[in-house]
Amino acid sequence: MSIGHFTVWDYVVFGAMLLVSAVIGVYYAFAGGGQQTSKDFLMGGRSMSALPVALSLTASFMSAVTVLGTPAEIYRFGAIFCIFAITYFLVVLISAEVFLPVFYRLGITSTYEYLELRFNKYLRLCGTILFIIQTILYTGIVIYAPALALNQVTGFDLWGAVIATGIVCTFYCTLGGLKAVVWTDVFQVGIMIAGFSSVIIRAVVVQEGIGRILNDSYHGGRLNFWDFNPNPLQRHTFWTILIGGTFTWTGIYGVNQSQVQRYIACKTRFQAKLSLYINLLGLWAILVCAMFCGLAMYSIYQDCDPWTAKRVSAPDQLMPYLVLDILQDFPGVPGLFVASAYSGTLSTVSSSINALAAVTVEDLIKPYFRSLSEKKLSWISKGMSLFYGGVCIAMAAVASLLGGLLQAALSIFGMVGGPLLGLFSLGILSSFANPIGAFVGLTGGFTVSLWVGIGAQIYPPLPERTMSLNLTTIGCDIGSPGTGGNWTATTEMPTLTALVHLQGTERPVLADYWYSLSYLYFSTLGTLVTIALGMIVSLLTGGIKQNIDRKFLLTKEDLLSNFSFSKPKTNEKVEVLNWKPFTMADEGTDNPVFNHIEMNVTENKEKVNGAHV
């Protein structure tokens, strides 16, 4: 028995997905008069509703890394990864109730505008630069991941696939702006679910029922949901996933421009919060799909592991191998799976490109070129989308040097996202945090998280820290499912460790302790160091004497407003921020709070600091 190969129908399905995504971009380039202003292009006119935004949020960070990495994670390490279901709930709760009220009230486009309002323009610049670095690195990974899948499934040139991904994303993102990004995400999350479902349904049929899959998984130790070991050096335990995962993902959903930009583009604050809570259901659904794919993979290959048997060269290639094995008799369905992996990439990369364009225009161009008209800013935004599309394609080469896609992606978010989360938390939760304390905290948090993160890449944790479960090839010689002989692993993914030739050197003391810290704690470490240093330095430099406007802080009213049904006007109040009390008033732009009512007012030609209100 041999595994299958791509047919004409697979290419048709795959091509149709790309075509529909491109058409959506073309439609929103011209719908409703096109993208006339930078606000239309970057924020969708602040007229989005909850459901499409929720699906877009789900699609963006549950990407090709999820489609390829999570089933392989569960196949190798067991279902303890599903503790992330609890983590996602905490993340959405914190994002919706702590960060969203402040960002939405200020009506900002870039989250880093908040840093200038609360602290100063230099911290805004620091936040912007860190975000750009973080996003470009992450986007490189999610471009490389499906290209790898496509290469393994079809033999299509790896770097040809990388370039094709970037071009399609850049095309519809540059043409249609945020609305195109959101609505292509809605389409693509459906493709992702369909791809997962096709694998699960076929696996259940092959294994003659879900009971056998669960039974095999139980006896193989894969149903290891609960491990309460408090050791922070253990890669995945209940505590590392709950605590470390919450910090990591709050850095994504709470303050990351790619996510925040979508939900503050909603027409009311209620719709914005609703989008986050609906998104939670989407995160759970995709996590469950990925879990069942991983367990089904183990049930099918429990006696003949394709990775150990050298039929694939990296764990991230296991899902494409499974698809070609069990779906070879169904023309078009393997193409659906590859389309689902590609959909994850398109959604994530397009969101990243749009967010990168937004922070560049809002933080690096508008404050210094105030005479630019909205029409010119709209063209500049499109130009930035085009530019960042090219940069992200180039950065995909970095991903080819990293080993496990899932861990590498979350490690990047931890190392950079943690200190940024700490910085925003200082501003929103601490009334006495001042610019000096915030800068020292950010520098300290970034230094510590980068130190441990890079150290962990150079000196990977010992096998006993990762708790990889048993895999065997004992059945490979007797014709077990998936033992086809025509598989050739053509793409290897060397780790950074191999690149710098450090395997043979003696491990330093730090390697088995400090550098062996669970990768999920990178973000926790960066956040806590930033907050602790920031508060201490602020107190020592007179921060307690400063007078901070309450609209920059989380207030009791923000929390209680969710339970006040007698005051629906809170969602529709239009307020223009007053910069007069601040000495840096001439260094930024006013941030009017937009909503769907204001978007219909065309006769108001007044300008504030060179921007139309």
Image (cartoon, rainbow, N blue to C red):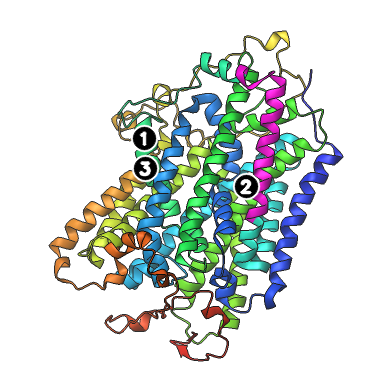
Residue 282 image offset from top left, x and y in percent: 55, 46
* Relative height, residue 390 to residue 552 (above, below): above
**Would residue 472 be counted in the magenta stretch?**
no
Discs 2, 1 touching: Cβ within 8 Å: no
Q: Earlier in the sequence, mark 2 or mark 1?
A: 1
Residue 140 image offset from top left, x and y in percent: 57, 50
What's the distance in space between the residues labelled 2 and 1, CA to CA?
Answer: 26 Å
What's the distance in space between the residues labelled 2 and 3, CA to CA?
Answer: 25 Å
Residue 579, visible in the rendered structure: yes
Q: Residue at x 48, y 33 (%)?
A: 82
- Amino acid of disc 2: Gly
The quadrant the N terminus occupies is: top right
Circle nearer the viewer, 3 or 1: 1
* Relative height, residue 181 to residue 223 (above, below): below
Residue extending farthest to the right is: 8
* Relative height, residue 189 to residue 7 (above, below): below
Q: Residue at x 80, y 40 (%)?
A: 10
Secondary structure found at label 1: helix
Q: Residues within 10 Å of mark 1 (few under 14, many from 20)?
A: many
What's the distance in space between the residues labelled 3 and 1, CA to CA?
Answer: 10 Å
Q: Quadrant of residue 379?
A: bottom right
Task: Check disc 3 and report the residue beneath it.
Answer: 522
Circle nearer the viewer, 2 or 3: 2
Task: Check disc 1 and report the residue beneath it.
Answer: 240
Residue numbers of the magenta segment: 185-212
Task: Check disc 2 and report the residue beneath it.
Answer: 344
Is 243 in front, or is 150? 243
